[in-house]
Amino acid sequence: MKLIVFSGLPGTGKSSLAERQLMLGQSVILDSVAGTETIRSRWHQLAKQHDAGWRMIECTCSDESLYRSRLKTRKRNIPGWHELEWSEVERVKPYYFPWEGEHLVLDMLNSFTENFLKAKIYCE
């Protein structure tokens, strides 16, 4: 059983049935910006509380023009939710703190397959 956190600024390719799933002995993947230490610490404690492995994956996109382009064409298809714009990323950026400790960074410049394989190996 593991608790795997996908984190990153909005739109980089990265949520909270976590406790219920862990209580059932099931692994959990959280998809969240998780920009503050408060939420990160809470999730880490939750993993410890349920003897779940802790893996942290941070999604980034090191090419801003590609990042903007992907965000502009992204369609989440979630009824009632607006699509994110670059201004939202800029608004969140100052509140997003770098992760400390062991974690995997996936750059969206790499292919999906490459990132998937890196994440799979890291989470095993």
Image (cartoon, helix red, strand yellow):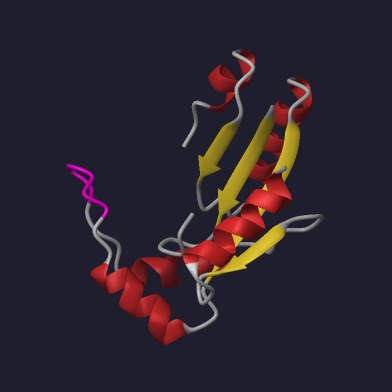
Q: Residue furthest left?
A: 79
Q: Main secondary structure of the magenta part?
A: loop
Residue 79 image offset from top left, x and y in percent: 18, 42
Please determine whether, in this image, residue 123 is positioned above or below residue 1. Answer: below
- Pick the front one: 118 or 24: 118
Please determine whether, in this image, residue 28 is positioned above or below residue 75. Answer: above
Residue 124, located in which quarter of the rendered image? top right
Residue 109 image offset from top left, x and y in percent: 51, 77
Magenta residue check for 78: yes
- Pick the front one: 30 or 110: 110
Residue 88 image offset from top left, x and y in percent: 36, 66
Residue at the (72%, 29%) spot, across then down:
47
Residue at the (68%, 32%) spot, across then down:
2
Q: Is residue 50 left or right of residue 106?
A: right
Magenta residue check for 80: yes
| Quadrant into which the N terminus falls | top right
The magenta stretch spans which residues?
76-81
Residue 81 image offset from top left, x and y in percent: 23, 48
Q: Residue furthest right?
A: 101
Residue at the (65%, 59%) spot, across then down:
118
